[in-house]
Image (tube, rainbow, N blue to C red):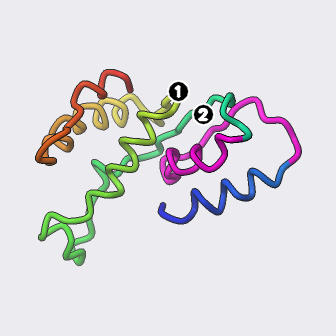
Amino acid sequence: MHGGAITLANAFLEQDEPFAAILASDMLDLPVFLSRIRERHSSIPAGIYFHENQLAYPWSPRDGDKKRGLNLHYSFLNYTSALVANAVFFNSDFHRKRFLSDLPDFLKRYPDNQNLDTIKEI
């Protein structure tokens, strides 16, 4: 989820074909991808499809980050990707409701600039 957006944006910029839209999966850092292509493709609408979301993704029992309360970054990438997308799609109503209901508690974990009002934009 980290470097893929840059690599994919670079490959996208090498294409000569016109694109009507971008549809990305929840595994892409959409804000980084869009920032890399904006100079040439700022008018292309972008949607994001959530097969799952990192807010509700189950942690491995062997992952020490969970016990230390670390690694919120992937969840934040899902949040910001949904926020910048022109359209947000989910594989089920359950996942949509879960993502939107988990966002307030997730954002409240930050000490300031929680941006709770942005949830309604999604």
Q: What residue sits 48% from the left and 61% below the top?
A: 1
Q: Position of residue 14 (x, y in %)?
A: 81, 55
Q: What residue sits 16% from the left and 47% below the top?
A: 110
Residue 103 counted in the magenta span? no
The single residue placed furthest to the front in the displayed view is 39
Q: Position of residue 16 (x, y in %)?
A: 88, 46
6 left or right of 66 in image:
right
Give the CA distance from mark 1 to mark 2.
7 Å
Quadrant showing the C terminus: top left
Which residues are drawn in magenta? 16-39
Q: Position of residue 17 (x, y in %)?
A: 87, 41
Query: Is residue 34 positioned above or below 10 on the image?
Result: above
Residue 32 counted in the magenta span? yes
* Secondary structure under the numbered disc 1 in the rendered image: strand
How crowded pointer 1 is (Cα within 10 Å; few <14, some 14-19, many 20+) is rated as some
Numbered tag placed on residue 61 in the rendering: none
Residue bearing mark 2: 46
Task: Pick the residue in front: 41 or 15.
Answer: 41
Quadrant in which residue 63 is drawn: bottom left
Q: Do callouts 1 and 2 mark residues in contact (Cβ within 8 Å)?
A: yes
* Secondary structure under the numbered disc 2 in the rendered image: strand
Residue bearing mark 1: 87
